Image (spheres, rainbow, N blue to C red):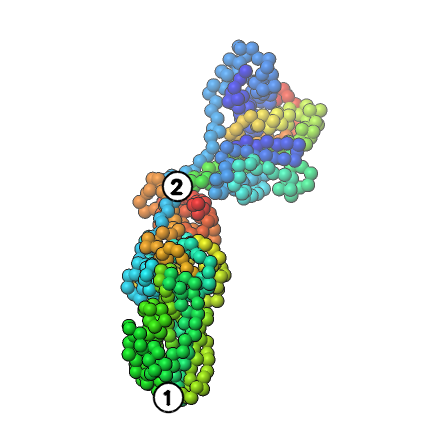
């Protein structure tokens, strides 16, 4: 049996001779059809099963000089090369926290320490290289409430980062120079720091002048006239602060509150902010902002007015016992009081636009923390000191061109043919198919498709 | 490239170079060394199947000589060109009946050469077109019987 290549030769030879007959009349019809080429082709195809060895030899001899070019035409680039790509992932590290422009690695909240009394803007940078990264989250720290004890104490605000509170307004020295605070409602825990109860105490100047709040052993002397609304702001704040301390000393035998008092006589505002320990192991006295009021005498003639504390708008988030809320980079910690143990992650959203890696502090993100109703934890309430654990990653894809010819240009593009990079590397953030094109100086362009998926 | 013709209605083009990773595949064609036609194919591993609709006919692909040219750009940018000249024979065999009856040796010889062209991978389309024209267009009065030269 002839092999296919030899059959091809027989066919081509037959066709060639036939065409030659028509073109150049070189072969007679009979010589083509009857004598050789046609017969040979028919024998090599239709009659191949009848061929003897000698017949095959004769056929092969007839086509031994025939050459057939059946190769595929390939027009290669001048400099053929191959392209591949690899993905490398860089994990970010939140490497610094800033508070008021100063490196502030964490907010230490622990037993027997006072909380910060104001909103704490946290600025951070991260260790990611490059300016593009995936939108993700970075854990800045966490607050662990520990085992909460179910008691009324849980319903009291024991931790808050906020501004102080306006007690009321209109207490101007001009309008009511003889007016004064008459009663104030304070909240106190038991000796173990739990079981808070709220009691209203009369603290008007007459009780001071009669020695009710200045007669304990550790009590400080107070000029009762400084408690009148007509007094200077400095004198009023000093006297009122002493008064609150004396109340605590007199009622509970010690100094448990650290009040901060502000007064603006012109605006007629009086603000009181008590700093209260979290997880106290001893008695605590302070102002429960959810159950606080003040009664004041407008003119010294017992013309009494009672008003509740009015927290400033930015200070209270109405998400008690609700799920945590997040608005932009402002995060509210609002644990559910019925949960006995709960860890709260504080995190910020990362995106390529929100976290430029530069040294301009004004561009850094910040997280505003407002913690409400943390409750009476049996363990220390602390922010993690090991801040910076995060899930922020950068994804860098690097194309490899082999051989990498000098002068070759590169281009990464997306599905919309938008140029993402003109180098061999590109930072990717969205799962999709991207195209890398390399063009040699001779104009040979080769493309490579890279399917990017965000690693699990 | 291999071209097979089935039931007068399907022209199937296969090639080991038809890969899903190709970036471009263009099939161009010339009919009877005259009419030109081009079709851009979505890169695929499957054979390219042409039907009468591709030739603006309804029932069958017209008989004749088809020059097929496959231009492929593969995944690394290399351009590969494959060509094939194909004799499509649906009704030409029947048209040759009168040649047999009239002992028209030249038409018969040309037709048999066309039939042999499937076994000739590098036959030129110009040659096959010449044979096709002789096989199908020779007038009766110009009959040249075999052996009468």
Q: Report the Cα–Cα distance between label 1 and label 2.
A: 84 Å
Residue A69 vs residue A389, the one in the foreground: A389
Comparing B145 with B96, the one in front is B96
Indicate the chain on which mark 2 is placed: A
Q: Residue at horizontal 46%, vertical 63%?
A: A152
Quadrant in which residue A263 is drawn? bottom left
Q: Do labels 1 and 2 share a chain?
A: yes
The residue mark sitting in front, 1 or 2, is 1
Q: Is residue B126 left or right of A369 when viewed as pictured? A: right
Nearest the camera: A278 or A303?
A: A303
- Residue at the spot of label 1: A177
Circle 1: element type: loop
Dot 1: chain letter: A
Residue A121, image x, y percentages? 35, 65
Q: Name the residue under label 2.
A: A84
Q: Residues within 10 Å of mark 1 (few under 14, many from 20)?
A: some
Q: Position of residue A138 (x, y in %)?
A: 39, 54
Residue shown at 44% from the left, 45% from the top: A456
Image point 43% across, 74% down: which residue? A200
Q: Helix, strand, or loop for circle 2?
A: strand
Above or below — where is A338 with respect to A260?
above
The residue located at (48%, 64%) in the rendering is A319
| x, y percent for residue A19 | 56, 28
């Amino acid at each position: 049996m002839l092999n296919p290549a030899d059959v091809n030769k027989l066919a081509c030879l037959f066709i060639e001779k036939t065409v030659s007959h028509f073109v150049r009349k070189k072969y007679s019809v009979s010589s083509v059809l009857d004598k050789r080429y046609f017969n040979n082709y028919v024998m090599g195809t239709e009659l191949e099963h009848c061929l003897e060895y000698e017949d095959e030899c004769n056929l092969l001899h007839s086509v031994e000089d025939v050459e057939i070019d059946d190769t595929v035409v390939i027009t290669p680039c001048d400099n053929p090369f191959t392209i591949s790509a690899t993905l490398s992932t860089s994990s970010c590290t939140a490497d610094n926290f800033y508070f008021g422009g100063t490196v502030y690695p964490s907010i230490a909240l622990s037993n027997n320490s006072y909380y910060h009394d104001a909103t704490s803007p946290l600025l951070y940078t991260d260790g990611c290289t490059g300016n593009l990264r995936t939108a993700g989250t970075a854990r800045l720290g966490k607050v662990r409430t520990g085992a909460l004890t179910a008691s009324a104490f849980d319903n009291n605000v024991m931790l808050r980062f906020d501004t102080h509170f306006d007690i009321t307004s209109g207490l101007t020295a001009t309008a009511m120079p003889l007016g004064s605070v008459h009663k104030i409602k304070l909240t106190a825990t038991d000796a173990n720091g739990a079981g808070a109860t709220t009691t209203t105490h009369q603290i008007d100047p007459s009780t001071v002048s009669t020695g009710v709040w200045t007669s304990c052993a550790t009590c400080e002397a107070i000029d009762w006239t400084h408690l009148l609304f007509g007094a200077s702001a400095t004198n009023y704040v000093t006297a009122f602060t002493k008064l609150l301390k004396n109340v605590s000393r007199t009622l509970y035998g010690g100094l448990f509150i650290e009040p901060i008092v502000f007064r603006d006589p012109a605006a007629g505002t009086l603000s009181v902010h008590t700093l209260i320990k979290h997880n106290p192991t001893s008695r605590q006295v302070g102002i429960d902002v959810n159950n606080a009021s003040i009664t004041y005498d407008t003119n010294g003639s017992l013309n009494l007015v009672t008003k509740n504390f009015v927290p400033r708008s930015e200070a209270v988030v109405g998400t008690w016992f609700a799920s945590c809320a997040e608005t932009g980079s402002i995060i509210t910690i609002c644990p559910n009081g019925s949960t006995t143990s709960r860890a709260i992650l504080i995190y910020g959203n990362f995106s390529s636009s929100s976290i430029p890696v530069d040294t301009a502090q004004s561009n850094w993100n910040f997280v505003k923390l407002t913690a409400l109703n943390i409750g009476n934890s049996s363990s220390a309430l602390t922010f993690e000191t090991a801040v910076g654990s995060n899930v922020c990653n950068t994804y860098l894809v690097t194309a490899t061109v082999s051989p990498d010819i000098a002068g070759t240009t590169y281009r990464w593009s997306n599905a919309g043919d938008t140029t993402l990079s003109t180098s061999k590397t590109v930072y990717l953030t969205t799962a999709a198919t991207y195209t890398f094109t390399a063009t040699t100086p001779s104009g040979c362009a080769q493309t490579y498709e890279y399917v990017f998926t965000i690693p699990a | 490239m291999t071209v097979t013709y089935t039931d007068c209605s399907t022209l199937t083009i296969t090639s080991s170079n038809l890969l899903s990773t190709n970036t471009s595949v263009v099939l161009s064609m010339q009919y009877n060394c005259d009419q030109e036609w081009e079709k851009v194919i979505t890169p695929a591993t499957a054979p390219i199947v042409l039907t009468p609709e591709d030739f603006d006919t309804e029932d069958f692909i017209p008989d004749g000589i088809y020059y097929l040219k496959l231009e492929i750009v593969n995944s690394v940018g290399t351009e590969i060109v494959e060509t094939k000249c194909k004799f499509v024979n649906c009704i030409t065999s029947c048209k040759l009946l009168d040649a047999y009856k009239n002992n028209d040796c030249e038409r018969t010889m040309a037709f048999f050469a066309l039939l042999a062209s499937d076994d000739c991978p590098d036959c030129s389309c110009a040659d096959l077109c010449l044979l096709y024209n002789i096989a199908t267009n020779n007038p009766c009065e110009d009959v040249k019987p075999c052996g009468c030269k």
